[in-house]
Image (spheres, grey):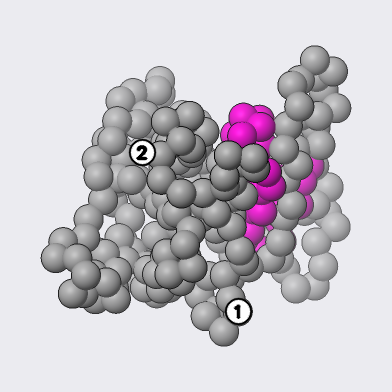
Amino acid sequence: KLVDEVLLLDEERDESNDNIVDNDPYGSVLWPAALTVSEHITRDSFLKSGDGGDNNHPPTLLELGTGTGLVALAASASNKYESILATDYETVPLKLLDAAYSLNQNDDNNIPTTTPIVTSLFDICNLSVPLPPADIVCAADILYEKSTGIALAKRCIEALERGSRVVIGCSPGRPGRPAFLEELKRLLNPRLKEVDFVDVEGRTCTGERNSLICGEGSSSISDEPEMLIVAL
C-alpha cells in the first residue's frame, strides 16, 4: 500500500520537482544506522539513563532527517515518548511517513496504543532557524556531505546547551563523518579532549540499491541480514 502512496505522490508533485529520488536519493531507502538508532532510543535502559522527561511524563523526541521514517515509527510503536516530531528538508519523505503511520494504524485493529507522529519541514543546514524543542534529539545516516556534517555538529551543540540528549547514528563510509567529528571537537574544546563515535553491533539492510547511492562492495547491504558495526 505504501508503494501506491509513493506513486500517487509522484503523480501529484508540483512544478518545484520536489522528488525524493531526484533531490535526495539517500533518504529514499533504509540504511543500517536507522535500525541501530531505532533500537537504541526505544530501550528502557536508554530511557532510564540520564535526563529527559521526568517521573510523571515520558520524554519528547525530535528526529532530524527522518528519510524513510523508521526511527519515528519505531519510537511511536514503543509508546515510550510523550510526543514525536519527525523532520526533513524534503516534503516527500514527510508525506510518506504520514501515510505509513496511517496505514499501520488502519491495517491492524489489534495494534497497541502508539504515540502520534507530527511531521515538519526543517533544514538542519539553515542555522537561522532554531532547533525545535525536545528532550531527545536523534539522527540516523544523514552525514552524506561535509556541509551537513558541520551543520549537524552545530545542531548537536545547540541541543546539548539547552539540556537535550543527542543520539547520532552513522553507517560505515559516510563522507560527512570526519567533518562532523572535527567540528564537534572544535566546538566542545576545551571541554573534551576526544570526540568520537562508539562502535556498536548492528546489521546490514537488504533490498536493491541504485549504484549511484550504493556502490559495488558496500558493506551496508547484503542478500540476507548480517552483523555490521555501526557508529553511534
Q: CA distance from mark 2 to mark 1?
A: 33 Å
Question: Is 110 in front, or is 165?
Answer: 165
Question: Which residue is drawn at the image coordinates 30% and 25% (left, top)?
Answer: 227
Nearer to us: label 2 or label 1? 1
Instruction: Give the x, y percent position of residue 154.
Output: 41, 73
Number of numbered discs overlaid on the protein picture: 2
Residues drawn in magenta: 72-100
User: In the shown orientation, is residue 3 left or right of residue 39?
Assistant: right
* Residue position marked by numbered label 1 in the rendering: 129
Question: Which residue is drawn at the image coordinates 14% and 65% (left, top)?
Answer: 193
State whether residue 186 is above or below residue 83: below
**What residue occupies the far left of the structure in this picture?**
193
State whether residue 62 is above or below residue 18: above
* Residue 3 visible from this viewpoint: no
**What residue occupies the far bottom of the structure in this picture?**
128
Give the structural element (helix, strand or loop) at label 1: loop
Question: Is 104 in front, or is 81?
Answer: 81
* Residue position marked by numbered label 2 in the rendering: 220
Instruction: Give the x, y percent position of residue 224.
Output: 40, 20
Asked where in the image residue 204 lies, by quadrant, the reply is top left
Q: Which kind of residue does numbered mark 2 sit on?
A: Ser
State whether residue 57 is above or below residue 221: below
Instruction: Give the x, y percent position of residue 129.
Output: 60, 79
